């Protein structure tokens, strides 16, 4: 049995197009540089930065969930909030709590599966085409928060522990996303499964790109400023959002 959401609930999710994924990757890259700027460059630490970004996330998601219509900048503000808090939350779990990248990734993966499982059990589907109730939208944003946090841990694991470095990690995650795109266009695999796979793996791609931009040369990065990199990424996202549709996607 599937849930019976209200047919009058406003659609507040953009259409999932190439432009959507370009903004998503930019947002996840910004999440890495912005999160590191606050926790590391400003020397606030992972716990304090996580607290700051979590308040931003709660505020943004409350505005989004209670909104009466789709607002593109509000939607992407929530996405950015999940990427920044995801960066510092994953770093706090991996480093401050000492569980390591593998341990952190496993914990976050189980948390994400639990959220998706509860969502499916409650409403019968985890498809973004069925965000037609407040309950579904809340599940959606919690799942996105955990998927972006998991993606951070995966990106750090592949770049740091595997020995591939940031460039190698970028190529690996780009290849995985290419395979997911191939699955979408050329197979009959579930589009819902492929969406969530793409959502998870765009996050570590953004994480490795962000680290590639800002880490020191002796760590394999380009040693660019976290603040200036974040500013450029923010400007790029704003330009892309302005070019995107003002209307929500037609999810039917």
Image: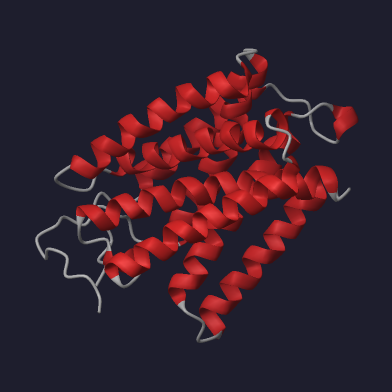
Q: Residue at x 51, y 70 (%)?
A: 194
Residue 101: % across, % down: 73, 44
Vertical side of 239 occupied by 201: above or below: below
Residue 139: % across, % down: 34, 54
Q: Quadrant of the C terminus?
A: bottom left
Res. 61 in view? yes
Numbered label tally: 0
Vertical side of 51 occupied by 160: above or below: below
Q: Residue at x 46, y 39 (%)?
A: 82
Q: Residue at x 25, y 49 (%)?
A: 246
**Front-most of residues 17 and 87:** 87
The quarter holding residue 4 reads bottom left
Vertical side of 111 occupied by 182: above or below: below
Q: Residue at x 64, y 36 (%)?
A: 93
> For this view, does 99 lie left or right of residue 135?
right
Extreme residue toward the bottom, this view: 188
> For this view, does 68 lie left or right of residue 157?
left
Q: Quadrant of the N terminus?
A: bottom left
Vertical side of 117 occupied by 1: above or below: below
Residue 122: % across, % down: 29, 65
Residue 157: % across, % down: 76, 47
How is the protein colored in the picture?
secondary structure
**Front-most of residues 245 and 111:** 111
Res. 126 in view? no
The quarter holding residue 87 reads top right
């Amino acid at each position: 049995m599937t849930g019976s959401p209200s047919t009058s609930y406003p659609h507040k999710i953009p259409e999932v197009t190439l432009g959507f994924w370009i903004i998503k990757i930019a947002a996840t890259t910004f999440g890495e540089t912005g999160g590191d700027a606050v926790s590391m460059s400003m020397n606030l630490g992972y716990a304090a930065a996580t607290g700051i970004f979590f308040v931003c996330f709660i505020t943004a998601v409350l505005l989004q969930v209670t909104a009466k219509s789709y607002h593109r900048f509000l939607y992407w503000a929530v996405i950015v909030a999940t990427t920044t808090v995801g960066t510092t939350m994953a770093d706090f779990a991996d480093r401050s709590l000492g569980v390591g990248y593998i341990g952190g990734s496993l914990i976050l993966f189980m948390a994400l599966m639990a959220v998706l499982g509860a969502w499916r059990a409650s409403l019968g589907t985890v498809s973004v085409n069925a965000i037609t109730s407040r309950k579904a939208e809340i599940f959606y944003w919690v799942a996105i928060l955990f998927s972006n946090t998991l993606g951070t841990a995966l990106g750090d694991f592949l770049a740091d522990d595997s020995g591939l470095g940031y460039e190698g990690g970028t190529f690996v995650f780009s290849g995985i996303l290419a395979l997911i795109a191939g699955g979408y266009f050329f197979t009959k695999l579930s589009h819902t499964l492929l969406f969530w796979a793409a959502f998870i793996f765009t996050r570590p791609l953004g994480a490795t790109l962000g680290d590639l931009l800002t880490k020191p040369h002796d760590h394999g990065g380009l040693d660019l400023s976290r603040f200036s990199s974040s500013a450029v990424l923010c400007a790029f996202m704003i330009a892309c959002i302005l070019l995107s549709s003002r209307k929500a996607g037609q999810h039917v």
